[in-house]
Image (cartoon, rainbow, N blue to C red):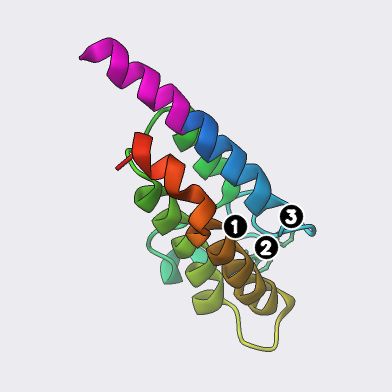
Amino acid sequence: CVIKKIHERTALSKALDHLLTLLEKKDPQNFFAWPVTDAIAPGYSKIISKPMDFSTMRQKVEDNEYGTLKDFSEDFQLMCENAMKYNHTDTVYFKASKKLLQAGQKILQSDKLGWLLQIAP
Ligand SMILES: CC(=O)c1cc(-c2ccccn2)c2ncccn12
C-alpha cells in the first residue's frame, strides 16, 4: 500500500544517508565531494560520459531516486571508476579512488547490511 511504500522509502533514504556519511569519511580530501569540472580537469566531460560525485548521490537519496541498495552502490562504483578512467595511475586522484572503492565496498558488502535489504529488496 502507498503508506507502507512511503514509510519503507523514508527508512531506505535514512539508511542510504547514513551509508553516504560513512563513505564520505573515506574521502578526507573531499576529492569526490562535488562534480569534477572541465576547469580543474581538462577534457573531463568528453572522457567521462556519466559523471558522479557524493553531492549528486546525496541529492538522489533525498529525491528518493534509489529504489535499492544496489542502485546506490552502482553510483558509488561509477564515481570511483570515473576517477580511475580519467586520472593516470600516478596521480593522487587515481590512488585515492582505488582506496575509496576498496573501503566503500567493505562498507556496502558487510553482512551487517542484511537488515537494510529487508526494506529494500
Ligand atoms: C575525482 C577527480 O577525478 C578529481 C577531483 C579533483 C579535485 C577535487 C577537489 C579539488 C581539486 N581537485 C580533481 N582535480 C583534477 C583532476 C581530477 N580530479
Indicate the position of residue 17 as horizontal and vertical percent values. Answer: 57, 36
Question: Residue type at mark 3?
Answer: Asn
Vertical comparison of 96 with 52: above or below: below
For the residues labelled 1 and 2, the Cα–Cα distance comes to: 7 Å
User: For mark 3, what is the residue?
Assistant: 30
Quarter of image, res 120: top left
- Asked if the magenta segment contains residue 80, the reply would be no
**What distance separates the C-alpha of mark 3 from that of mark 2?**
14 Å
Q: Answer with left or right where residue 80 lies relative to residue 94.
A: left
Which residue sits at x=30%, y=11%? Answer: 3
Residue beneath the point at 66% across and 43% down: 21
Q: Is mark 1 within 8 Å of ligand 1?
A: yes
Reading the image, the residue beneath label 1 is 36
Rendered image quadrant of residue 87: bottom right
Q: Which mark is residue 54?
A: none
Residue span colored magenta: 1-12
Q: Residues within 10 Å of mark 3 (few under 14, many from 20)?
A: few
The correct choice, above or below, for 60 with respect to 112 in the image is above
Is residue 106 something that shows in the picture? Answer: yes
Of the image marks 1 and 3, the number of the one nearer the N terminus:
3
Residues under numbered marks 1 and 3 in contact, where contact means CB atoms less than 8 Å apart: no
Q: Is mark 2 within 8 Å of ligand 1?
A: yes
Q: Is mark 3 within 8 Å of ligand 1?
A: yes
Q: Nearer the viewer, residue 29 or 35?
A: 29
Q: Which image quarter has ligand 1?
A: bottom right
Residue 40 — which label? 2
